[in-house]
Amino acid sequence: MSCEHRAPGSAPIVAVGRSRFTLLGTAHVSRASAEEVRARVRSGAYDAVAIELCASRYRALADPGSVAQLDLFQVIRQGRAGMIAASLALTAYQQRLAEQLHSEPGAEMKAAIEAAGERALPLLLIDREIGVTLRRVYRRLGPWQRLNLVAGLGASLFSRERVTQEEIERLKQGDLLESTFAEFARRSPALYETLIRERDHYMAARLQQESRARGLEEVLVVVGAGHVAGLRARLEAPSAHPAAEQAALERVPPAGRTARLLPWLVVALILAGFGLAFARSGALGWQLVLEWVLINGTLSALGTAVAGGHPVSVLSAFVAAPLTSLNPTVGAGMVVGAIEVALRRPLVSDFQRLRQDVARLAGWRRNRVARALLVFVLATLGSAVGTYLAGFRIVEQLIG
């Protein structure tokens, strides 16, 4: 059984059983939001503080030096470089807004962490791991939607739009954010479902679990303004099995059969094209092989060069892409990214400046950590585009 109360000008309060959750919507780059969080925690009205962070994001915020423990070789070998690059791109725009407003990204979360520590209050990390969220996004989107997402993340690096302090404060009311999300949902319902709605469900389930396990009565919940409405709705209709719901939302769906078979089908068609060309004439066969190497290798090398890769990395991309494109288990980005890391090993200072550097495109090329990730992404993208362009060229030559 739940009910909702609201005092004029205050955050909504939702009662679930014996627990009451005060849902404080904040703007992530607002100094006023940070001050309000600090004042509420210090008021003594709460016996726990919940924040919209997962364990990995909490570590990055509370201990910026922890990023220095990142093993780029393992990240690239395990195929996680793209996810980490996407995560950094997601923070880049927020970092620039914070700089414009002379604020600090996640200042309200830091305020909650510090104030909870001062009063020795339990700190609840209620958000889903960002890596799980990004992988679920990737699984739910089709090829073109994935391309649009990558393009959108890339475009955010070029954005120079200025946002005023007054506009940021209006975001706290939730109306602008919620209307933006509504438009976003019309463009990409799958993306909205995974990035926003699922996390509302997940955070509500986490709050139910934690409050029951700890016997909490008054909990301050610090979340972005865009999550307040969804989180309140979920708490007003509490889950009968929050642990099961949380476990379901943490699972990453396996790739569909089409997604698993498509790369092998493309390779089979390309090899069949080579075979048919050589059956017609050796000259035609070698011509198509040469075009395959030039198109695939050049585009991957170009992507590596745009990322600011080492000249040896650029040459490696040219050599590796035509070969790795015929083996779906190994990507050009894995090979070239590993070579880039070996040639330009990141320094401690690169890890220390990582969050600041990724706020601008030039910083991605200057910072050795960010540059290695960018090399991985653009070498992979160049090879992928090259594979399809060269494949179309093979078909064109065979039927022409």
Image (cartoon, rainbow, N blue to C red):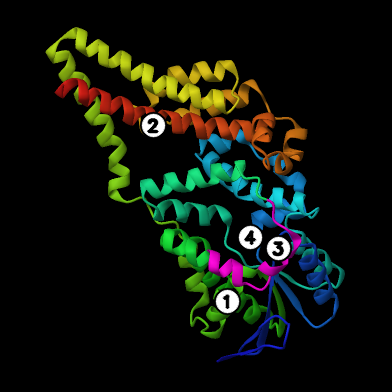
Mark 3 to mark 1: distance in Å?
A: 18 Å
Q: Specify whether residue 309 is in view.
A: yes
Q: Is residue 168 magenta?
A: yes
Q: Residue at x 28, y 40 (%)?
A: 262
* Position in image of residue 359 (x %, y %): 68, 43
Q: Which residues are magenta?
A: 162-180
Mark 2 to mark 3: distance in Å?
A: 39 Å
User: What kind of secondary structure does the magenta stretch mostly adopt?
Assistant: helix
Mark 4 to mark 2: distance in Å?
A: 35 Å
On residue 168, the disc is 3
Q: Residue at x 72, y 87 (%)?
A: 8
Mark 3 to mark 4: distance in Å?
A: 24 Å
N-terminal-most mark, 1 or 4: 4
N-terminal-most mark, 2 or 1: 1
Q: Secondary structure at mark 4?
A: loop
Q: Amino acid at mark 3?
A: Ile
N-terminal-most mark, 2 or 3: 3
Q: Amino acid at mark 4?
A: Cys
Q: Is residue 287 above or below residue 297?
A: above
**In the rendered image, which residue does mark 4 sit on?**
54
- Looking at the image, do the residues carrying marks 3 and 1 touch, with CB atoms under 8 Å apart? no
Which is in the foreground here, disc 2 or disc 3?
3
Q: Amino acid at mark 2?
A: Val
Which residue occupies the foreground of this view, 215 or 180? 180
